[in-house]
Amino acid sequence: MNDFRVPVRPTVIWGLLVIATAATFWVGTNHPFSTLGTELAPVLTLALAFVKASLVGREFMEIRLAPRPLRLAFAAWTAVFATATALALVM
């Protein structure tokens, strides 16, 4: 008998990435239901992009299993570059 089991954690993370990608597409399109201003849409798109980068790094590059200094360095890199990018976009 075939004992194939779908791993739950990567499947859930993949689903979140798909939802975040769809949300990014929805925010970035010009549709009649868009209530986001031209200032908020790029910031929200970049925020979703950095959330996705964090999820990919932690889950699929297995940084969550890495030594603590590497996990902290990755979290700091993500936070610093997300903040710098958002500030550059707003200015």
Image: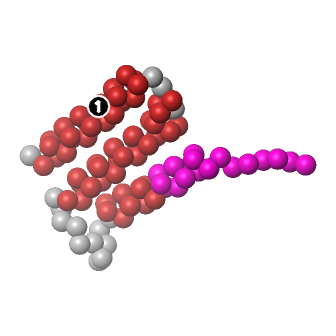
Figure coloring: secondary structure
Where does label 1 land, which residue? Answer: 76
- Which element carries disc 1, helix, strand or loop? helix
Position of 26 with respect to 5 (left or right) is: left
Quadrant of res 42: bottom left
- The residue lying furthest to the left in this view is 91
Percent coordinates x, y for residue 88 in the rendering: 15, 42
* Mark 1 Cα shell of 10 Å, populated few (<14), some (14-19), many (≥20): few
Residue 55 or residue 18, whichever sits in front: 55
Is 37 placed left or right of 7 in the picture? left
Q: Position of residue 9 (x, y in %)?
A: 57, 47
Q: At 69% across and 49% down in the image, what residue appears?
A: 6
Up-down: is 71 above or below 9? above
Image x and y of residue 63, in percent? 47, 30
- Which residues, given as a range, are shown in magenta? 1-18
Q: Is residue 29 above or below residue 17?
A: below
Residue at 23%, 53% (x, y): give it: 43
- The tally of labels here is 1
Any magenta on residue 17? Answer: yes
